[in-house]
Amino acid sequence: MEAYWLSTLGVLALCLLSVALAVHSGSSKGFAGKLSGPVIPADDDNPLYRIDRVHMNSVEALAPFVVPVLLAMMVGVGPVSLAVLVWVHLAIRLVHMAIYLRGGNAAKGGSVRTILYVSGALVTLVLILVTTWAALR
């Protein structure tokens, strides 16, 4: 497994990002005097809503990505190929987070933010296909 050290670091960074966003979301709601749970109004112009949604987006994207990464290691996907997929996914998630938290037109649905989210999903799909191919060989 030591051949996968770079992928392991990338997965740990994704997990750390998700935890950091959970803390940011919870503390932002607390400082605003809001309860935990969904933020109302559900509006991209509401900073608390964006913080909550970027956290939930990170959680929603984590498991479908991390499970295939672990399987890829088990079936012997090339360490360099896997590391590239992991770090591209992490970079997409970081840019997605920054744009969503900043707000403005790029953060609204159907714009740059959506393109980034779909790009991350496509990287996940490629990872699943590569892992499937390696498992069938």
Image (cartoon, grey):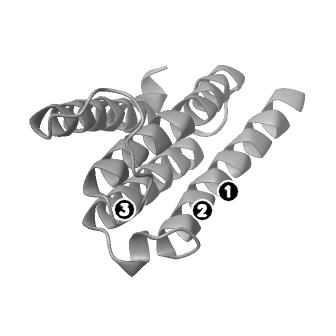
Q: Amino acid at mark 3?
A: Tyr
Helix, strand or loop at label 3? It is helix
In the displayed structure, 37 sits above or below 1; it is: below
Question: Which residue is denoted by mark 3 in the rendering?
Answer: 100
Query: Disc 3 and disc 1: Cα gap in Å?
Result: 19 Å
Query: Disc 2 and disc 3: Cα gap in Å?
Result: 15 Å
Q: Position of residue 65 (x, y in %)?
A: 59, 36
Q: Are circles 3 and 1 on residues that touch, CB within 8 Å?
A: no
Front tag of 2 and 3: 3
Q: Position of residue 103 (x, y in %)?
A: 31, 69
Front-lying residue, 32 or 73: 32
Question: Which residue is denoted by mark 2 in the rendering?
Answer: 119
| Relative to 20, 121 lies left or right | right
Mark 1, other Cα within 10 Å: few <14 / some 14–19 / many ≥20: few
Query: Disc 2 and disc 1: Cα gap in Å?
Result: 5 Å
Q: Position of residue 114 (x, y in %)?
A: 56, 66
**Residue occupying image coordinates x 48% and y 67%:** 113
Helix, strand or loop at label 1? It is helix
Question: Which residue is denoted by mark 1 in the rendering?
Answer: 122
